[in-house]
Amino acid sequence: VNIFDCDVTAVNISRDEIEVGKELAKKHCKTPDKIKWVCADSPDNIEGQFDVVFAGEFLEHVPEPQKIIDALEKRCKNGGQMIFTVPLGPWGDVPEYGEQRGHLWNFEKQDISDMFGNKKKLSVKTVSGSMNEYDKELLGWYVISYITSNAATGEIDIKRKINIQVPRGTLST
């Protein structure tokens, strides 16, 4: 808001997180009144068309990410910019979380290609983060951006994912 002098619609499923966002905006934005706050649990509950749609740390929590991508694209003007971020690495795989897993998906590079491969002016970047101390694996994010068009969103090849993650019944020595 400060840099681009634009209007922003901030959407979150959590009213509590919206309140936190409002407090942060009051502290850090020159014009916090340019932010419209919307509590919605579905893209269908968001009104308007937007030049840019940014969805961060979201797709890994929904059962059918391709359907959400399509629904969000309907909110973006034709030729507008879509930007998604998703975690890279085993973010939720730490003992402190016990059996609870917040992420339904651990996206791999092939999954990103399956879903976004047909998109116009597709850019996929990786951003490194910290390390999962439990597994000693690097964490980070994929940043996916593209221009809206009529290109279909692909589906993740779930059979491929199952085949590469199925425990093997043999032992190697």
Image (cartoon, grey):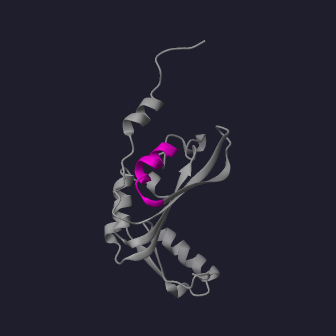
Horizontally, is 148 left or right of 101 in the view?
A: left
Position of 150 relative to 132 (above/below): below
Residue 132: x and y, percent? 65, 44
Is residue 108 shown to the viewer in this render?
no
Is residue 101 shown to the viewer in this render?
yes
Horizontally, is 70 left or right of 8 in the view?
A: left
In the image, what residue occupies the spot 51% across and 74% down? 19
Highlighted range, magenta: 107-121
Q: Of residues 126 and 47, which is closer to you in this image?
A: 126
Q: Of residues 37 and 154, which is closer to you in this image?
A: 154
Query: Which corner quadrant holds the N terminus?
Result: bottom right
**In the rendered structure, does residue 118 fall within the stretch colored magenta?**
yes
Query: Which corner quadrant holds the C terminus?
Result: top right
Residue 2: x and y, percent? 61, 83
Residue 120: x and y, percent? 43, 61
Looking at this view, name the residue that lies furthest to the top: 173
Position of 17 relative to 61 (above/below): below
Residue 158: x and y, percent? 38, 39
> Which of the 4 image quarters holds residue 71?
bottom left
Looking at this view, name the residue that lies furthest to the left: 44
Position of 5 relative to 96 (above/below): below
In the image, what residue occupies the spot 38% across and 40% down? 157
In the image, what residue occupies the spot 44% across and 55% down? 59
Q: Of residues 85 and 90, which is closer to you in this image?
A: 85
Count up the numbered dots. 0
**In the rendered structure, does residue 2 fall within the stretch colored magenta?**
no
